[in-house]
């Protein structure tokens, strides 16, 4: 009689365990399928945001032309006007002046106002001048460019090292300066 009760108890426990396993497997399968679908959707959206061989061209009201090319571009998810660029080359064709060439490893282009931030290994070539630095803020609206971080300005006669360089694109006026008044721009003559 005790053996029968033990057998019934073991049978009931086994049935209970099997029912729990079946219920748990059905619940977990539903959760797994809901997790997979959003991931696939995110990957599809993400892959469509990448672009190869990007080129943007615009002209301002004075007739100056701005051409920016990059090997890769990625549209910002939160702001479709922002495009992150890689391996950038820019050409600024100024009316009544020589072109300004800009290269950098990375950049951020705003397609609504055409402002561009160049970063990492930024090089500007204009006439016989070369300016290198790590960060360049170029604005069509302000008609200026501001180079900062490890700025080195080289021409045929001098090498200048400073914290920042600011250039007005209309007047070509250029300011080279340090942020702290007690520091001075380092000037070295090539001759």
Image (cartoon, rainbow, N blue to C red):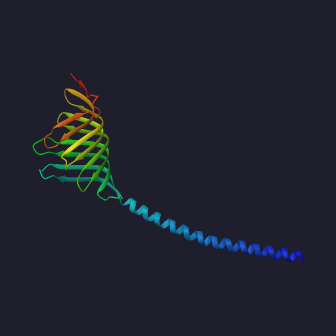
Say if 76 sits above or below 16 in the image: above
Image quarter for residue 79? bottom left
Q: Quadrant of residue 76?
A: bottom left
Residue lying at the far top of the rendered structure: 191
Residue 6 higher or lower than 130, as above or below: below
Q: Residue furthest right?
A: 1
Which residue corresponds to the image point at 22% horizontal and 48% vertical from the top-left?
Answer: 139
Where's the C terminus, which quadrant?
top left
**Residue closer to the observer: 133 or 52:** 133
Q: Residue at the location (41% across, 63% down)?
A: 44
Front-most of residues 147 and 41: 147
Relative image position of residue 159 (x, y in whole percent): 24, 28
Which residue: 19% across, 41% down?
100
Tell me residue 7's x, y (percent): 83, 75
Q: Is residue 42 left or right of residue 147?
A: right
Q: Is residue 169 above or below residue 6?
A: above
Quadrant for the N terminus in the image = bottom right
């Amino acid at each position: 009689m005790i053996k029968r009760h033990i057998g019934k108890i073991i049978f009931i426990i086994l049935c209970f365990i099997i029912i729990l396993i079946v219920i748990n497997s059905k619940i977990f399968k539903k959760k797994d399928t809901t997790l997979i679908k959003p991931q696939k959707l995110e990957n599809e959206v993400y892959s469509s945001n990448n672009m190869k061989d990007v080129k943007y061209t615009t002209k301002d009201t004075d007739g100056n032309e701005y051409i920016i090319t990059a090997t890769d571009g990625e549209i910002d998810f939160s702001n479709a006007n922002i495009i992150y660029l890689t391996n950038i080359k820019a050409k600024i064709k100024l009316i009544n002046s020589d072109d300004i060439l800009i290269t950098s490893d990375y950049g951020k282009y705003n397609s609504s106002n055409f402002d561009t931030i160049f970063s990492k290994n930024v090089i500007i070539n204009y006439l016989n001048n070369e300016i290198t630095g790590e960060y360049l803020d170029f604005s069509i609206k302000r008609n200026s460019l501001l180079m900062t971080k490890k700025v080195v300005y080289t021409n045929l006669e001098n090498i200048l090292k400073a914290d920042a360089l600011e250039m007005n694109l209309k007047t070509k006026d250029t300011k080279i300066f340090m942020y702290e008044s007690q520091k001075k721009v380092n000037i070295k003559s090539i001759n």
